[in-house]
């Protein structure tokens, strides 16, 4: 969400310039908290919400017909997205087994279809293995297809991101944030204030 909002607004991200553009966020899980998280980011940064479209219906990456239909819908948008976030690969996988080489290859073909047709950067969120937290779940097929991979870990209120694969550049140093509460201008049905959380940059 932090990266998506920086792309949507064109704000520098951790001191680095950002190319502004539309963002398509495909949410296969965590839908209830998404609107609060996005609102919290815009409130914290004093920005008007813009340039983000959230899709709360999971896609099926392994279904070529379904992906072709999605590509047609995206290309019909007034402006193509610069960034497409797939959250998560598992919840948007479609029929098949993510541990199957053949099925994961089909899912990667679905991601490639999105990338080639739209020209957007594809940001896929994927869970780590149950026993090995240093690698993504399933076999090596997904990782081999990536341009870059980053591991996100949470230690109490600190969130750390470190590069675990860089195809065409040196591994950047790890980055860290502190997870902080952000009040929202909303109330629940009982009149109780609603809040969410934002990431505040910190030092590793």
Image: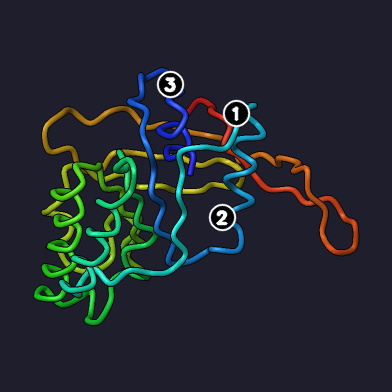
Q: CA separation, marks 2 and 1?
A: 17 Å
Q: Nearer the viewer, residue 194 or 130?
A: 194
Q: Nearer the viewer, residue 125 or 38?
A: 38
Q: CA separation, marks 2 and 3?
A: 22 Å
Q: CA separation, marks 3 and 1?
A: 13 Å
Name the element at disc 2: helix
Q: Residue at x 18, y 67 (%)?
A: 107
Q: Quadrant of residue 64?
A: bottom left
Could you tell me if the residues under marks 3 and 1 are in contact, i.e. CB atoms within 8 Å?
no
Q: Which mark is residue 160?
A: none
- Neighbor class of circle 2 (other Cα within 10 Å; few <14, some 14-19, many 20+) is some
Q: Residue furthest right?
A: 191
* Residue 134 rendering spot, x and y as whole percentages: 30, 54
Q: Residue at x 23, y 58 (%)?
A: 71
- Neighbor class of circle 1 (other Cα within 10 Å; few <14, some 14-19, many 20+) is few
- 174 lies above or below 105: above
Give the labeled residue for mark 2: 34
Mark earlier in primary sequence (3, 1): 3
Q: Which mark is residue 47?
A: 1
Name the element at disc 3: loop
- Neighbor class of circle 3 (other Cα within 10 Å; few <14, some 14-19, many 20+) is some
Q: Which mark is residue 12?
A: 3
- Number of numbered discs visible in the structure rendering: 3
Mark earlier in primary sequence (2, 3): 3
Mark earlier in primary sequence (2, 1): 2
Q: Is residue 179 left or right of residue 148?
A: right
Q: Residue at x 47, y 66 (%)?
A: 29
């Amino acid at each position: 969400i932090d990266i998506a909002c920086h792309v949507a607004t064109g704000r520098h991200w951790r001191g680095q310039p950002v190319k502004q553009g539309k963002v398509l966020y495909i949410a296969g899980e965590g839908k209830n908290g998404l609107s609060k998280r996005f609102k919290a980011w815009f409130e914290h940064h004093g920005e008007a919400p813009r340039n983000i479209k959230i899709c709360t219906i999971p896609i099926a990456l392994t279904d070529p017909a379904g992906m072709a239909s999605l590509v047609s819908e995206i290309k019909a948008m007034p402006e193509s997205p610069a960034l497409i976030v797939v959250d998560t690969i598992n919840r948007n996988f479609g029929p098949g087994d993510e541990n199957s080489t053949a099925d994961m290859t089909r899912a990667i073909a679905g991601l490639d279809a999105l990338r080639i047709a739209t020209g957007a950067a594809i940001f896929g969120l994927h869970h780590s293995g149950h026993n090995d937290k240093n690698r993504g779940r399933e076999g090596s097929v997904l990782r081999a297809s990536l341009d870059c991979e980053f591991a996100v870990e949470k230690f109490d209120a600190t969130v750390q991101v470190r590069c675990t694969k860089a195809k065409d550049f040196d591994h950047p140093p790890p980055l860290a944030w502190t997870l902080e509460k952000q009040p929202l201008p909303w109330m629940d049905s009982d009149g109780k204030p609603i809040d969410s959380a934002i990431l505040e940059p910190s030092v590793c």
